Image: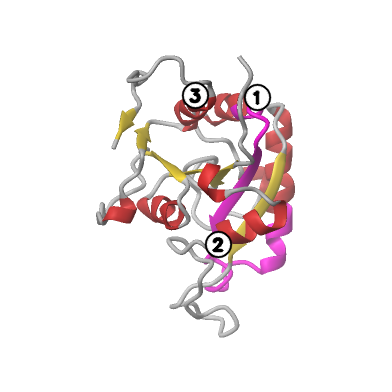
Amino acid sequence: MALSTKNGAVLLDKDGTLLENLPYNVDPQHMRLAPGAAAGLRQLATTGRRLVVISNQPGVAFGYFPETALGAVRDRLAQLFEQQGASLAGFFYCPHHPAGTLPRYAHACTCRKPHSGLLKRAARQFGFCLRHSWMVGDILDDIEAGRRVFCRTILVDCGNETEWRRTPRRIPDYIVGDLRMAARLIVREMQPRQATGIVAAGMVPR
């Protein structure tokens, strides 16, 4: 069956969702896909949707690495996508943190998740509709960022969310175990609705 894109995108958190979670890592040699992410990217590549990475990078604000180091991170992400037959449309990051040590970056902003500034920026740049898009992340800040702009949301529950501070904006549409399962769900939801009321094994709706 043909997939319907409806001018949407798939927005992916980086660390813990797409990559193994190595805090503040910007060394391309240590960037590895998380379990299930390779298969997930292969499935997402079939959808025809833009694949965009949305990431908080507070290590810049804390002086752990310069903002320029994120260029190599973007290049490595593109390589990892390409190895799975997928294409990275964009890498959008927030370098700020209110408690940062570098004054230039140490402030509140609208781009740091759970705010949705990065998602809006990506949508403006590529011209896709956020209401027809998916936000996939491993913590509830990712979910809130997506729900603020009416994306459908998937929480990859891999153990990285520890606070579980729930508000209406922090309840995902689905909870899955890895990106492979998230991609399978997205592909399924994009199919013409001939059968309803079916939830795939391991995919828990909210």
Tag 3–tag 1 contact (CB < 8 Å): no
Q: State yes or no: residue 48 in magenta.
A: yes
CA–CA distance in space, label 2 to label 1: 29 Å
Q: Is residue 133 visible?
A: no
* x then y, percent, for residue 71: 73, 57
Q: Residues within 10 Å of mark 2 (few under 14, many from 20)?
A: many
Foreground residue among 143 and 177: 143
Q: Residue at x 61, y 43 (%)?
A: 31
Mark 1, secondary structure of its residue: loop
- Residue extent of the magenta highlight: 44-72
Which amino acid does the dot numbered 3 rest on? Arg
Find disc 1 in the rendering and name its residue: 46
> Which of pointers 2 and 1 indicates the residue nearer the eye?
1
Which amino acid does the dot numbered 1 rest on? Thr
Question: Which mark is drawn over residue 187?
Answer: none
> Which of pointers 3 and 2 indicates the residue nearer the eye?
3
* x then y, percent, for residue 75: 74, 48
CA–CA distance in space, label 3 to label 1: 11 Å
Tag 2–tag 1 contact (CB < 8 Å): no
Find disc 2 in the rendering and name its residue: 57
Mark 3, secondary structure of its residue: helix
Q: Is residue 23 visible?
A: yes
Query: Relative to 26, is 43 above or below?
Result: above
Find disc 3 in the rendering and name its residue: 184
Q: Residue at x 54, y 40 (%)?
A: 18
Which amino acid does the dot numbered 2 rest on? Gln
